[in-house]
Image (cartoon, rainbow, N blue to C red):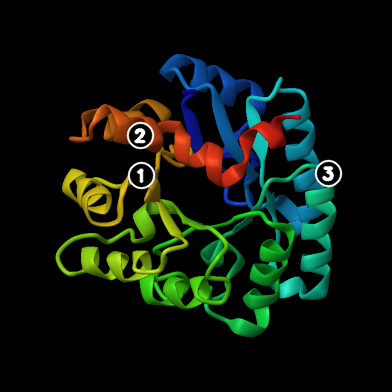
C-alpha cells in the first residue's frame, strides 16, 4: 500500500508561508510518501480560480503523485459553487474549505450547505480546516456533516486543535457522525489518535502532514510511534485516503 499524505498546501499564502510542488515532492521522498492530497493556500488577491488552476497543473506534472483539491470562498455564493464544478471537471478530487482564513462559520447553512450539496452531487469529499474557535469547532462541524450524511467530511487537526481535557470529547461528538473522518496533523496527544481508532475504527483516521504549516517528518512520526496494528497503520497511512479521494481516478 502506498503512503498517502492526506494534505499539503501548495503556492504562496496571503499570510506569508509558501511551498512549491518541487519542494513538496522532495519532502515526500525524504519521508517515504508516495502521493499527497494537495490544495491551494489562501491566495494573494483572493484569486481562487488561478490558485486552483495552479494546483491542477502541478498535479498533471507530478506523474500521479499529487492529487488536487480545489479551494473556494463560500462568501462568493453561486460563483463559489460554479468554481467548484469547474475545478472538478478539470480533475479536482474534492473541495477544501478553511473557515478561519476565509472567515465564515462552517455551520452557516446559507453559505456552506450549497457547497456540501454540490460535493455530494459530484460524489467527492469535503475537507475542512477544523478546530478554529467560533469558525469550525466540533459541534459546528457535526452540524455541517449532517447536511450530507452519506458524503465524506474530512477534518484537519483531529477535528479539534485544543485537545486538552474535555475538548477531546468534543472532537468525538463530531466523529459520532459516520461520514466524519479526522487527520493526524498537529495532534500531540497520541492517546487521542489511538482512541479514535479504538472507538470509531481505523477507517476514520488519515495521516496528513499539512505541510508547510507542520513538518512532514515530524507528522509522519505521529503515526509511526502510535500503538496501531500493522493493518490499522496501513489504512491510516494510505488506504483510507485512497478510498475517500479515489486517488487512482485523480491521478489519471
- Residue 85, placed above or below residue 213: below
Q: Are marks 1 and 2 in contact (CB under 8 Å)?
A: yes
Spot occupied by residue 186 in the image (x, y as percentages of width and height) = 34, 46
Q: Residue 110 carries which label?
A: none
Mark toward the viewer: 2 or 3: 3
Residue 8 visible? The answer is yes
- Determine which residue is flagged by label 1: 184
- Closer to the chain start, of discs 1 and 2, is 1
Q: In this view, does 8 lie to the left or right of 204?
A: right
Q: How crowded is mark 1: few (under 14 residues within 10 Å), some or many (20 or more)?
A: many
Q: Split into 4 quadrants, where in the image is the C terminus?
A: top right
Q: Which residue is drawn at 68% across and 46% down?
A: 93
Spot occupied by residue 147 in the image (x, y as percentages of width and height) = 56, 77
- Closer to the chain start, of discs 2 and 3, is 3
Give the Cα distance between marks 2 and 3.
Answer: 30 Å
Q: Are marks 2 and 3 in contact (CB under 8 Å)?
A: no
- Determine which residue is flagged by label 2: 219
- Determine which residue is flagged by label 3: 90
Q: Residue at x 38, y 60 (%)?
A: 159
> Which quarter of the picture shows residue 177?
bottom left
> Which quarter of the picture shows residue 200?
bottom left
Q: Residue at x 38, y 51 (%)?
A: 204
Q: Residue at x 63, y 25 (%)?
A: 65
Q: Residues within 10 Å of mark 3 (few under 14, many from 20)?
A: some
Looking at the rendered structure, the secondary structure element under dot 1 is loop
Q: How many marks?
A: 3
Q: Is residue 46 left or right of residue 163?
A: right
- Closer to the chain start, of discs 1 and 3, is 3
> Which quarter of the picture shows residue 148?
bottom right
Residue 77 or residue 240, whichever sits in front: 240
Give the Cα distance between marks 1 and 2.
Answer: 8 Å
Amino acid at each position: 500500500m502506498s503512503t498517502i499524505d492526506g494534505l499539503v498546501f501548495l503556492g504562496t499564502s496571503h499570510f506569508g508561508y509558501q511551498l512549491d510542488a518541487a519542494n513538496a515532492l522532495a519532502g515526500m521522498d525524504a519521508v517515504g510518501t508516495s502521493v499527497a492530497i494537495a490544495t491551494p493556500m489562501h491566495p494573494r488577491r483572493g484569486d481562487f480560480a488561478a490558485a486552483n488552476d495552479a494546483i491542477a497543473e502541478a498535479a498533471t506534472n507530478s506523474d500521479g503523485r499529487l492529487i488536487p483539491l480545489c479551494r473556494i470562498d463560500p462568501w462568493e455564493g453561486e460563483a463559489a459553487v460554479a468554481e467548484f464544478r469547474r475545478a472538478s471537471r478539470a480533475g479536482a478530487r474534492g473541495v477544501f474549505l478553511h473557515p478561519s482564513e476565509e472567515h465564515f462559520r462552517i455551520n452557516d447553512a446559507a453559505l456552506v450547505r450549497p457547497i456540501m450539496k454540490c460535493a455530494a452531487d459530484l460524489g467527492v469529499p469535503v475537507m475542512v480546516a477544523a478546530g478554529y474557535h467560533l469558525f469550525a469547532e466540533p459541534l459546528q462541524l457535526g452540524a455541517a456533516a449532517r447536511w450530507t450524511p452519506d458524503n465524506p467530511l474530512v477534518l484537519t487537526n483531529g477535528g479539534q486543535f485544543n485537545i486538552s481535557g474535555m475538548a477531546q470529547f468534543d472532537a468525538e461528538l463530531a466523529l459520532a457522525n459516520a461520514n466524519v473522518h479526522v487527520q493526524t496533523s498537529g495532534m500531540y496527544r497520541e492517546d487521542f489518535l489511538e482512541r479514535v481508532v479504538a472507538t470509531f475504527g481505523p477507517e476514520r483516521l488519515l495521516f496528513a502532514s499539512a505541510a508547510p504549516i507542520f513538518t512532514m517528518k515530524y507528522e509522519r512520526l505521529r503515526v509511526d510511534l502510535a500503538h496501531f496494528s500493522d493493518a490499522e497503520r496501513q489504512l491510516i497511512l494510505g488506504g483510507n485516503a485512497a478510498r475517500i479521494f479515489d486517488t487512482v481516478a485523480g491521478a489519471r
